Image (spheres, rainbow, N blue to C red):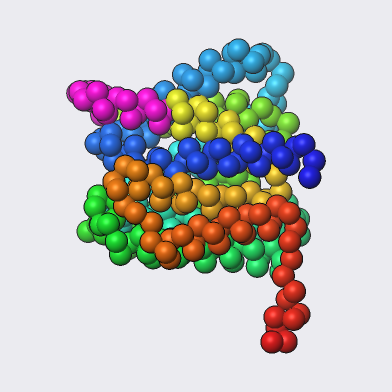
Amino acid sequence: MNDGIKRGTLEMVSAMLICGTIGWLVLLSGQPVLDVVFWRCVFGAATLLLICGLMGFLRPGILTRATFGLALLSGVAIVGNWVLLFGSYSRASIAIGTAVYNVQPFLLVLLGALFLGERLSAQKMAWLGVSFLGMLAIVSAHSDVGRGDTGQVGSDYLGGIALALGAAALYAVAALIIKRLSGVPPHLIALIQAVTGVLLLAPWANLSPLPQATTAWASLATLGIVHTGIMYVLLYGAIQKLPTTLTGALSFIYPIAAIFVDWFAFDHRLTPLQWLGVIAILLAAAGMQRGWSFNLRRLAWR
């Protein structure tokens, strides 16, 4: 494995672990979805502006008109992704919303095959299938035990499913666009996306009155600084370095992280079925990364 793949894998794993705490912070903030996304973009843009300035990414010549337009388009997709995903939490549940949202690696792999000419082998689909089965095991067990704020089914279940599917589709589109921006620093891409979110959502955000609780501001600031400023730099850096199929496999670490956050924050303990799902997802990620193969002919004969 070359150094680029190793670094990209580490960045992707770190991004997914951070991502696993998003649902908890969204609920902890107690704010409407559009407000949460708006303040996430505000704090994220401020953080990324500082990072880009320190790293010298604000100088002229880094972006062409075409790459700037693609970055803006990816920003619209990402902001829409956040709004739809956060909206699905209260309509279905965090567990169900996360489960449906995690079909996005399959959408990303399919889009990569259609538009980037990446080879889609039966072997790659088999490992993605193992990851998907592991995710289903986690969520199916999680939805039946420890029902609290994160496990209850909302009043608009089908609407929540639709929102999560829409969020998955928008993420896949954004990731595909980012693949076209391989020469652009990921820090700058994330900055443009955060600024795009501020401009798009400012007319609808509730700026009067502002949130009063310290918990709300702490949650919103963390979502912006850590889950946007830091996490998206890691995520986009990984997407640019890794094959689409490996990116898809490592994305399944996200629901694992969410399960452990549930355990520590809400005392929802893992069941044997959930542990089986965790093992399946990690096995699939390792198999994709190391190039392990199934003997498909022998399995078909049996």
Residue 137 x %, y %:
45, 65
- Asked whether residue 119 appears in the rendered view, the answer is yes
Farthest residue, direction bottom: 302
Q: Nearer the viewer, residue 221 or 260?
A: 260
Q: Nearer the viewer, residue 215 or 200?
A: 215
Magenta segment boundaries in residue numbering: 206-224
153 lies above or below 222? below
Does the magenta portion include 167? no
User: Is residue 95 shown left or right of residue 64?
Assistant: left
Taking the spot 73% from the left edge, 54% from the top edge, the residue there is 290
240 lies above or below 115? above
Taking the spot 70% from the left edge, 21% from the top edge, the residue there is 62
**Number of numbered callouts drawn:** 0
User: Is residue 249 shown left or right of residue 166?
Assistant: right
Q: Nearer the viewer, residue 13 or 223?
A: 13
Residue 122 x %, y %:
71, 69
Does the magenta portion include 220? yes
Q: Quadrant of the C terminus?
A: bottom right
Q: Quadrant of the N terminus?
A: top right
Q: Nearer the viewer, residue 20 or 180?
A: 20
Residue 99 x %, y %:
43, 58
- Asked whether residue 111 appears in the rendered view, the answer is no
Farthest residue, direction right: 2
Residue 195 x %, y %:
48, 26
Taking the spot 60% from the left edge, 26% from the top edge, the residue there is 187
Taking the spot 29% from the left edge, 24% from the top edge, the residue there is 217
User: Is residue 264 shown left or right of residue 77?
Assistant: left
User: Is residue 156 shown left or right of residue 274?
Assistant: left
